[in-house]
Image (spheres, rainbow, N blue to C red):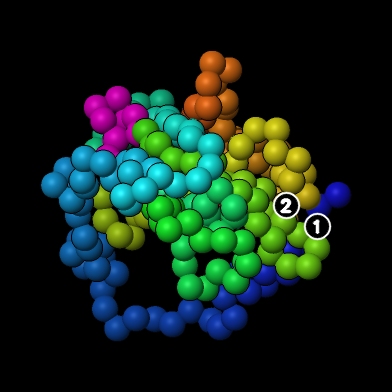
Amino acid sequence: MTVPYSGIPGRQPHHPPVLLPCDPEAAELTGPVFGPAAVGPSDHDLTRRHTGEPLGERITVSGRILDRRGRPVRGQLVEIWQANAAGRYAHPADRNPAPLDPNFTGTGRCLTDDEGRYRFTTVRPGAYPVDATAWRPAHIHFSLFGTTFAQRLVTQMYFPGDPLLDRDGIHHAVRDPAARARLIAARDPAGPAYHWDVVLDGPCATWTEGTR
Ligand SMILES: [Fe+2]
């Protein structure tokens, strides 16, 4: 049974939209543009951002960014953020009493190659409590930047076989079972490697926050 997540109402807008006194198309055209120079050579490796080794199981997460016809999306900025192996974010707003890891910040980024591939090395994130009765399953947040800020898509990747998935209110906020299943990575039987493709649009599009 899915446990209602008390945090969901807090994620919804409580006021009507405000019309900004600017041209949104102009904002898109002048938004930030990232190129290869903006991404460091080790930004994809979350285990090498500090002098020491982070705690937790080393994993790789890789896949492709594709359009609705299966064509690769090249040069796409892919950013991830996640909790550490104990389920704690390195963020002042995280009140989980689990320990911080001084050798793990939990953020990384890379650009897709000519085949639309991305690849991260990280540690498997821990589950964490969201209130007195519910825990979030292990997950990694993904951001795909598009070509301008206004195109940014945000979603979450989950791990196969996680017993917390069936009770997670956020995962089950995706009503379509097939779309929900597409958010779960595939594990490589040969090692601690996970594969997860993101499809930007079309009937098999990956669910993104804001999708209904
Ligand atoms: Fe999270």
Q: Which mark is residue 38?
A: none
* Mark 2 residue CB less than 8 A from any atom of ligand 1: no
Q: Farthest residue to the right: give it.
A: 1
Task: Check disc 1 and report its element: helix, strand or loop.
Answer: loop
Residue 153 spot, x, y in % from top left: 42, 52
Q: Which residue is mark 2?
A: 168
Q: Is 23 part of what is drawn in magenta?
A: no
Task: Check disc 2 and report its element: helix, strand or loop.
Answer: loop
Height in image: 18 above or below 80?
A: below
Q: Which mark is residue 3?
A: 1
Residue in the picture at 26% in, 41% down? 42
* Mark 1 residue CB less than 8 A from any atom of ligand 1: no
Residue 2 spot, x, y in % from top left: 81, 52
Amino acid, disc 1: Val
Residue in the picture at 13% in, 47% down? 37
Q: Farthest residue to the top: give it.
A: 190
Instruction: Return the disc, 2 or 1, that comes first in the chain's sequence.
Output: 1
Is 34 displayed left or right of 156 in the figure? Answer: left
Magenta-tinted stretch: 110-118
Q: Farthest residue to the left: give it.
A: 37
Amino acid, disc 2: Asp
Height in image: 166 above or below 189?
A: below
Is 3 displayed left or right of 21 in the figure? Answer: right
Q: Distance of mark 2 from mark 1, alpha carbons?
A: 6 Å
Residue 5 spot, x, y in % from top left: 73, 63
Circle 2/circle 1 CB separation < 8 Å: yes
Residue in the picture at 49% in, 41% down? 123
Along the line of sight, which residue is nearer the eye, 176 or 19?
176
Height in image: 65 above or below 191?
A: below
